[in-house]
Image (cartoon, coloured by chain):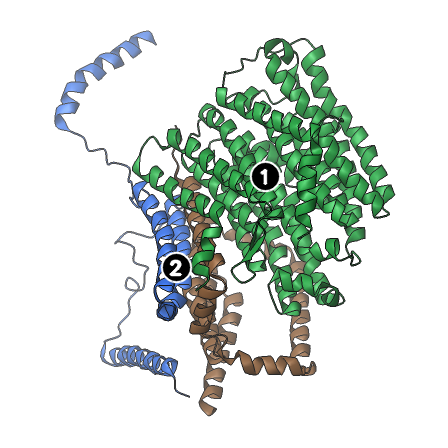
Amino acid sequence: MTANTEIFQLLPHLVIGVGIVLSVVIEISTKKSESILPWFTILIFVFAGAHSIINVYDYQILFGGMYAIGGVTAIFNFIFTIGAAIMVLNAVDYIKKSKMNFGEFYILVQSSVLGMMLMAGARDLFMIFIGLELMSICFYVLAGINRSRMGNTEAALKYFLLGAFATGFIVFGIALIYGTAKSTSIDQIVFAYEYFITDVLFLTGLALFVIGFLFKIAAFPFHMWVPDVYQGAATPVTGLMSTTGKAAAFSVLIIILSAVFTQNITNNFEILFAVIATLSMLYGSIVAIAQDNLKRMLAYSSIAHAGYMTIGLAAGNIESVSGIIFYLTAYAFMNLGAFGVIALIEGSNEENLDINSYSGLNSKSPILAGFMALFMFALAGIPPMAGFFGKYYVFVASIKADLTWLAIVGVFSSAISVYFYLRVVVYMYFKDSTSSIIIKNSFTGLLAVIISGLLVLVFGILPDTLFSIITSVLSY
Amino acid sequence: MILEYILFAILGLVAVVTSVAMITRPSPVMSAIFLVLNFFALAGLYLLLNAQFIAVVQVIVYAGAIMVLFLFVLMLLNTDSEHAILKEKRKLKFIGIFIAVLVFIQIGYIVFYSAPSDSVTKEIAESINAGKIETIGTELYTTYVLPFLASGFLLLGATIGAIVLAMKKFE
Amino acid sequence: MLTEFGKIFIFLLLAIGFVGIALFAAKLIRPHRPTKEKLLIYECGENVEGSPWVKFNIRFYVVALIFLIFDVEVVLLFPWALTYQEFGFYGFLVGVIFLLILGLGMAYEWRKGDLNWDRTKPNIPELSKILTNKNVSNVKIDEQIKES
């Protein structure tokens, strides 16, 4: 049995898997689990993330073509684990504040991260499906974990119904792909992609599969759930869903379409992706202007960002994939940081989410105001921040693929989006405080914001380091 | 072979009669009970096709767990409103019948007119063992051992999620 | 062609036949004298009142959900029970790990007290309490009357 020893090469997964088991044991055995579990969770996440990024060049296919480690998978694992670790750090005080301080919260976060990691490493449609379900089910529960809040319950129900609908698309797509390709192995599907794609049934199956994941990344025609769910769910949970959840869905799209990216095959979905990217960018940017609730504004901005990333899918070359992955990394940390600041300012019962709550923030807490400004600049894509380079790489790739018009639309829509990002900055610095908000001191919350801010700056000042790692890894 | 045909006729008849009974009963609980019978007849048909694992799944999961959930949902909902909808909107009924006829024609076309290609018939000959539980077990513990273990975590997450959502007490 | 399943089928036929014959025989023997009272729906000796559609406790639903989850586990263990010997210790270990993970879910459920059916405690009046509280409550009622 070769699988006997292969299992030990999945060390990050093993650590998180054993971590879940131990967390449940801690939850069972002590009454004070909620004071132990956050630190334990962060510990295993940081270990798994560090292990993944150290072994990034160690690309291997395990379990007879079922699973891959190293390479792009390792970078995605880094996003998931470090992003989730920052979110947990941020959530420690938040869930105390909003009276839902359960140990189960952390167990569910761990399980969802395990699901994302399984999705990113999967080389088989079954594996993708199980990882997706593990992630989604934990997200449904996390979205509605605070039953006493109406917004939470509404978010969970909407997310569950539409998510289940999207899963239906994915399963039907998998069935059609299996029916024509006679295999669920992604390596085989990618290997004979050029031959299969002429088959109408295969094309339909792949289209359904892709549409299912467009739901998960919140691209335009499939975005209906996003504003309500992002607004209703607890703020750190929204941060996790909008960053790592999006990255996990993109990892699957990149793997299943990898034949297009690496073998120079005509991209059958180019028009689909181009239209979706255009609509998402414009819709997200324009509707976000009218939002006064900051969480809702970031939800629409998340739709717009999904649009920018989809440009990379439309371009369909190797540069665009590196662009998407870089963008996802940058977006994960800037969005987590922004939600971190929101979580700190938010009151105990969904108050202080309005943009007026941020007026004059600079005089009350210059550190928070400074970091919020940093994240807003990064999200808007202003040069020395990581967000700029994400957009830059994706736009360059799309120009290379003769999709200059798409890049122009992208630049145009980023110009629109500057308005609502900078509006927050203007409120913070140039408006007098109208409300008397007491910001509760939270060391861990502040630490989470600082770490994500530093990561955004590092990726912004030294984008080439990460980008060269991604490009060299992609050649496998 | 004769025995197989007789069994097929009996089970098929039971499946058809119970499914017709299911959609014509006025009481939803009676419909659900007929659906259970229908599931059992289908399980028998799967056995005749040598698909033992699917038969087992059909009985344990569908006739067992899913039907329990169905009955609970029926109990939780106020089922009177359902009748009102059908009485008020006659059009819905005709659309339903139209779609049913369309699907029936489609299936009939596939069964009678599309000749199985060579590759398909060859695969059928090979697949005589594919439905056996032993075959599935062997696959599950060699190729698919990782998804199998991952599904353990999936079920654990679902258990904890269900309990957290429904049971957690708030102050 | 009579496999193991064939035997089970014959067993099923025998079982159905047994029940059918028993019911038929009983019908032949028993007296049949219906009256109006006998044909009424029987519900604990009370007259039937209202619709049986009442709101259920959510606990029933959770029990059904947990049942569904463990049902799926049984389906996945079915192939394991038949084939783990082929793989020796490795096959055994895989099944045991799977069972441990799900057993943990069971332990969690048990420990959190979700298997207990906590009923609302019946409020049994105690004579001593009533006697001590009586004076107090009377005084309070008097005060309320005065205030009004």
Circle 1 residue: A79
Instruction: Pinpoint the chain carrying mark 2.
Output: C
Nearer to us in this view, B12 or B152: B152
Which residue type does callout 1 highlight? Ile
Question: Residue A380: x and y, percent?
Answer: 74, 28
Indicate the position of residue B70 as horizontal and vertical percent values: 46, 57
Question: Badge 2: how crowded within 10 Å, few (<14), some, or many (20+)?
Answer: some
Q: Find chain B in the image and tell me its colour.
A: brown
Q: Which chain is blue?
A: C
Residue position for label 2: C94
> Which one of the lettered chains is coloured green?
A
Q: Nearer the viewer, residue A188 or A465?
A: A465
Identify the residue at image location x=53%, y=66%.
B23
- Label 1 residue SS: helix
Front position in the image: C129 or B13: B13
The CA distance from mark 2 to mark 1 is 30 Å
